[in-house]
Image: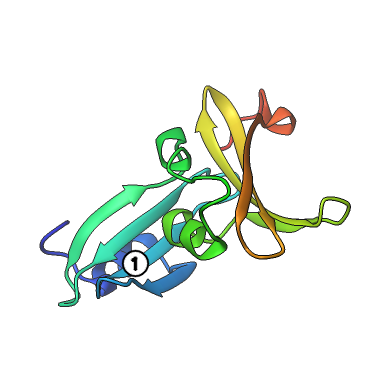
Amino acid sequence: MPGKSTAAEAEARLGEPAQRLKLANGDSALYFSRLPYGRAMYVVTLGSDGVMKSIEQRMQQATFAKVVANSWTKKEVNELLGPPGNQGRLDRQKRDWWEYRYAGIGPRIVFAQFSDDGVVREMVDVADEDRIGIRDD
């Protein structure tokens, strides 16, 4: 509960975080992943006092739309979206990719593609053809 809950209470309810980050403003963030097929990344933001400020589900189009190609870095994408559900390399394009699955109009996947300097070059949003017609619950 924002304004009351602590990190320990969030972990007791949501499990072990997939990632813990200290943010530039002194807050910290806990990333609770349900990827790949749970299609959710819950981010709990805690103030410097250790009390929850907010909880958000980040796997949604509006959140992905914040990422600006040719400007954002891996670090910024990681802070916004959390650890990817899967990752790999496109050798011919010389790009790394991170995969984020979400539930849009049907199951979807967003691929963040990064050049070797760690800059986002493209965000690709596609239908998750392998999962269409399959329930993820």
| Residue 109 percent location from the top left of the image | 62, 38
Count of numbered marks: 1
Left or right of 119, for residue 56: left
Q: Residue furthest left?
A: 3
- The scheme the figure's colours follow is rainbow
Given the image, on which type of amino acid does mark 1 rest? Answer: Ala
Asked which secondary structure carries label 1, the reply is: strand
47, 119: nearer the viewer: 119
Other residues around mark 1 within 10 Å, as few (<14) / some (14–19) / many (≥20):
many
15, 65: nearer the viewer: 65
| Residue 43 percent location from the top left of the image | 36, 57
24, 2: nearer the viewer: 24
Which quadrant would the N terminus be assigned to in this image? Answer: bottom left
Q: Is residue 110 visible?
A: yes
| Residue 127 percent location from the top left of the image | 66, 28
Left or right of 67, for residue 85: right
Mark 1 — residue? Answer: 29
User: Residue 95 sits in which quadrant?
Assistant: bottom right
Which residue is pictured at 74% across the width and 32% down the height?
130
| Residue 20 percent location from the top left of the image | 41, 73
